[in-house]
Amino acid sequence: MDNSISYGDDYKYIPATSVGSGIGLEILPDIFCHTIQIVNICLVGIPNSNDFVLVDAGMPYSAEEIISVVEERFGVDKKPKAIILTHGHFDHVGAIIELVKKWEIPVYAHEAELPFLTGKESYPKPDPTVEGGSVAKMSFIFPVDPINLANHIEVLPADGAVPFMSDFQWIHTPGHTPGHISLFRKEDGVLIVGDAFVTVKQEYLYKVFTQEQEISGPPRYLTPDWEAARESVNKLVELKPKVAITGHGLPMTGDLLTSNLHLLVTEFDSIALPSHGKYVNKKIQ
């Protein structure tokens, strides 16, 4: 056991859930999405093979669930080649310490995300005053202290390649966090979005619980740079994805995805940008 790695001081269970919690969806033969409370993890690889990757690491205290999902899809005692992080917010790294200790595998993230993953820098505090509902208002309890993965974290290759995901490229999509990335496979248009945009109004408890599908920008309460967030959405739309697996909400595909992304780009200010909040019109310093 590596005791040099640890969660932040404010690490804790977050009492939030949805009707999709515990449900997995096979989007394509090698793309599997599983919801843990209110956030999605993604497994990329053919079932029962030894060649697969985990994208993101769920909510706090979800390690046993993630391990169970992995073993059900790939076999007992199987482990991914690596964990790829879209970013380091608490709901995307919530089980990562336990997973790294069990599996002894590398973790990859964008270079700009490393301060938040090596114990050096906390994320900006959530904004409970931002436009939105109950989830936004309770966001002050969300952990933002940095976790420390020490030498278990590695920087993604500068050329856009994704380790152990040879058909994918990573796309830098900052705004929600400085080092946020999305993953894209050109041959079939699969986009693993992270939180660059989501398919549920994440600020509203009822919509989170029911998982009502609705295109939206990144979660408002934890997005400090809206100019970068807008540019990231524009960048992803230009890829013309055919399948989008987002960090929050149900996957979206086909014409529904195309039309909704067009709507998000053309009406970003009314759909994504909050009418008020401490980070509106403010960039990360």
Image (cartoon, grey):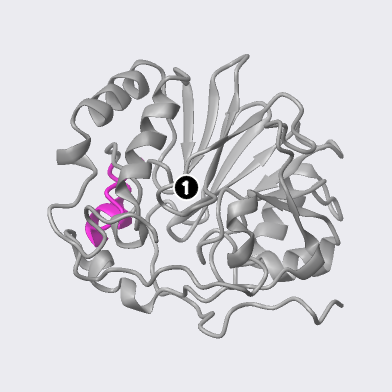
In percent of width and height, residue 176 lies at 41, 52
**Closest to the observer, 4 or 120:** 120
In percent of width and height, residue 37 lies at 46, 61
Query: Which quarter of the rendered picture does the C terminus lie within?
Result: bottom left
In percent of width and height, residue 11 lies at 54, 80
What residue lies at 36% left-to-right and 28% top-to-bottom?
234
Q: How many marks?
A: 1
**Closest to the observer, 109 or 10:** 109
What residue lies at 26% left-to-right and 60% top-to-bottom?
279
Q: Residue at label 1?
A: 247
What is the three-letter code of the residue carrying label 1?
Gly
What residue lies at 48% left-to-right and 40% top-to-bottom?
173
Magenta-drawn stretch, dominant element (helix, strand or loop)? loop
Q: Is residue 183 above or below residue 90?
A: above
Q: Residue furthest bottom?
A: 9
What residue lies at 51% left-to-right and 83% top-to-bottom?
10
Q: Is residue 63 left or right of residue 16?
A: right
Q: Which residues are magenta?
A: 198-212
In percent of width and height, residue 105 lies at 83, 56
Q: Is residue 1 left or right of residue 135?
A: right
Q: Is residue 50 above or below residue 187?
A: below
Say which quarter of the image contains residue 65. bottom right
Q: Residues within 10 Å of mark 1 (few under 14, many from 20)?
A: many
Query: Which quarter of the rendered picture does the N terminus lie within?
Result: bottom right
Does any portion of residue 25 appear in the rendered image?
A: no
Q: Secondary structure at mark 1?
A: loop
